[in-house]
Image: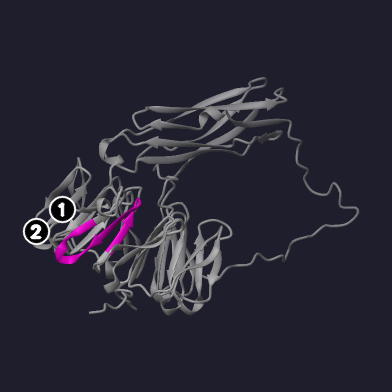
């Protein structure tokens, strides 16, 4: 029986900007205004960090020292303020916050200070950056080119470098699982949806209780009282920056959240679908068109007025336009039509497209080889991660398609029985399987083993 394409699983039902007034201001222009008002003193010396202050350190390092240099005319005294700014590294948890004033005596070319780190036994984000800023130099001094010193702390617990699994066991709560730390309960009830990030953070849609965030240091905390319809994490990649959430709140529009900047509404329009590709998000606004959002300026770029039936992205955006065929888009190449068929589902890995054509099987397309059939059978679902395709063939089990000398050798059977659902790690090196009454299982390149006898309602895996 022909399956219908999946739609959205469920739908449920700011302040105005203030313009600065010019009233009361006196605007001076034209001849005769020179010398009116306070005059800035000439900058005769520059203060900046020594470049060696930019570094990566182990969490076990007790303190990080910073060397600040002053060049130019050193005949007078000078001061500058220094302060820490949190990133993924959290003040009070990963380092001791500092705000201090450095004083240079006449003739003094350098000054130093230290920031203390916090060494704990908790698996956290593997990379935890923070910044130290120089600001407010005294009269006659200015800031040099290196006025910001980024520091990255490497977490040293074994589990921090391994993926974390999030499991929703309904009334028995939401749990995390790590290869070395085992199971840990983080919420007593079930969640409507879970999103995970490479910073080992979890975001839980608790329905009427709102949107919550969890990390291993601060535990569970509420981000919003409203019930989200969709949550995605942008910035979830190799740059080790803080998480940026895009949250669809339905009638109130699309919102952005990060720890450093808080909440901001991006659009009043309720998006139909969002697909994330590293630092980009592709957002289908239905009649409002298809847009790319990037968490930088300029943020928005309109791709098309026509909404696709489905999308997939991993370096290249692939779009299913139904009877109009399958198309690809990338900034370097623009639009290309890559296929005529109307697939039931698509997935992408770089420039490789995978398409489920139902009874016609699963096909792959590359620029070099064109279209070829991967499998004649019709899968129930498919995922792709780290260049590996995972296919759920129902009673025939879960399979992966990867590298191999021949098409047959590229298939690996992961389970002998049917699975209810599965989630894969972004690197494609593991799959967490809900085997129903047989419990939760995990597949890695070392084999297949059971994690728990219980039956979860949702699974998510961090990078």
**Across the whole image, how many numbered discs are drawn on residues?**
2
Residue extending furthest toward the right: 31
Segment colored magenta: 382-399
Q: Nearer the viewer, residue 146 or 1?
A: 1
Rendered image quadrant of residue 380? bottom left
**Which residue is labeled 1 in the image?**
441
* Magenta stretch: includes residue 389: yes
Q: Position of residue 431 (x, y in %)?
A: 23, 53
Q: Position of residue 387 (x, y in %)?
A: 35, 52
**Horizontal side, residue 372 vs residue 108: left or right:** left
To which quarter of the image does residue 369 belong? bottom left
Secondary-structure class at tag 2: helix
Quadrant placement of the N terminus: bottom left
Predominant secondary structure, magenta span: strand
Quarter location, residue 210: bottom left
Kindly identify the residue that appears in the image at 63 percent across and 21 percent down: 108
Judged from the image, the secondary structure of the residue bearing numbered disc 1 is strand
Determine the residue positioned at 50% across, 62% down.
Answer: 293
Residue 347 in view of the camera: yes
> Which residue is labeled 2 in the image?
438
Whether tag 2 and tag 1 are in contact, CB under 8 A, the answer is yes
Of the pair 204 and 374, the residue shown nearer to us: 374
Q: In the displayed structure, does residue 248 sit left or right of residue 439?
A: right
Q: Farthest residue to the top: give it.
A: 107
Q: Residue at x 15, y 53 (%)?
A: 441
């Amino acid at each position: 029986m022909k399956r219908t394409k999946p739609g959205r699983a469920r739908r449920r039902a700011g302040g105005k900007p203030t313009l600065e007034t010019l009233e009361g201001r006196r605007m001076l222009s034209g001849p005769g205004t020179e010398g009116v008002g306070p005059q800035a003193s000439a900058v005769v010396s520059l203060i900046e960090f020594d470049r060696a202050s930019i570094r990566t350190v182990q969490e076990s390092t007790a303190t990080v020292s910073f060397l600040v240099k002053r060049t130019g005319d050193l005949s007078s005294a000078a001061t500058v303020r220094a302060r820490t700014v949190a990133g993924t590294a959290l003040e009070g948890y990963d380092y001791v916050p500092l705000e201090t004033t450095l004083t240079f005596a006449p003739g003094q070319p350098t000054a130093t200070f230290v920031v203390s780190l916090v060494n704990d036994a908790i698996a956290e984000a593997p990379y935890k950056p923070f910044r130290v800023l120089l600001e407010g130099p005294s009269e006659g001094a200015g800031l040099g080119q290196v006025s910001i010193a980024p520091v990255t702390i490497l977490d040293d617990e074994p589990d921090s470098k391994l993926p974390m699994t999030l499991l929703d066991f309904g009334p028995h709560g939401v749990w995390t699982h790590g290869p070395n730390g085992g199971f840990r309960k983080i919420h007593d009830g079930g969640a409507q949806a879970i999103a995970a990030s490479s910073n080992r953070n979890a975001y839980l849609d608790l329905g009427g209780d709102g949107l919550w965030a969890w990390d291993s240091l601060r535990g569970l905390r509420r981000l919003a009282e409203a019930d989200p319809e969709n949550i995605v994490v942008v910035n979830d990649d190799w740059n080790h920056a803080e998480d940026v959430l895009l949250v669809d709140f339905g009638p109130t529009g699309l919102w952005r959240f990060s720890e450093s900047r808080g909440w901001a509404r991006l659009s009043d329009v309720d998006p139909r679908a969002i697909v994330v590709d590293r630092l980009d998000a592709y957002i289908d606004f239905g009649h409002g068109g298809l847009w790319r959002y990037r968490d930088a300026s300029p943020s928005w770029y309109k791709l098309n007025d026509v909404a696709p039936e489905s999308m997939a992205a991993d370096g290249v955006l692939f779009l299913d336009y139904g009877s109009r065929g399958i198309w690809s888009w990338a900034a370097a190449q623009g639009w290309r039509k890559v296929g005529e068929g109307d697939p039931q589902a698509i997935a992408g890995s770089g420039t490789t497209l995978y398409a489920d054509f139902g009874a016609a099987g699963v096909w792959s397309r590359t620029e070099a080889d064109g279209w070829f059939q991967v499998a004649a059978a019709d899968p129930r679902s498919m995922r792709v991660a780290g260049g590996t395709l995972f296919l759920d063939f129902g009673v025939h089990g879960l399979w992966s398609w990867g590298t191999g000398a021949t098409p047959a050798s590229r298939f690996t059977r992961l389970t002998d029985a049917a699975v209810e659902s599965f989630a894969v790690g972004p690197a494609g090196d593991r799959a967490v399987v809900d085997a129903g009454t047989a419990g939760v299982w995990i597949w890695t390149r070392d084999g297949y083993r059971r994690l728990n006898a219980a039956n979860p309602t949702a699974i998510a895996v961090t990078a």
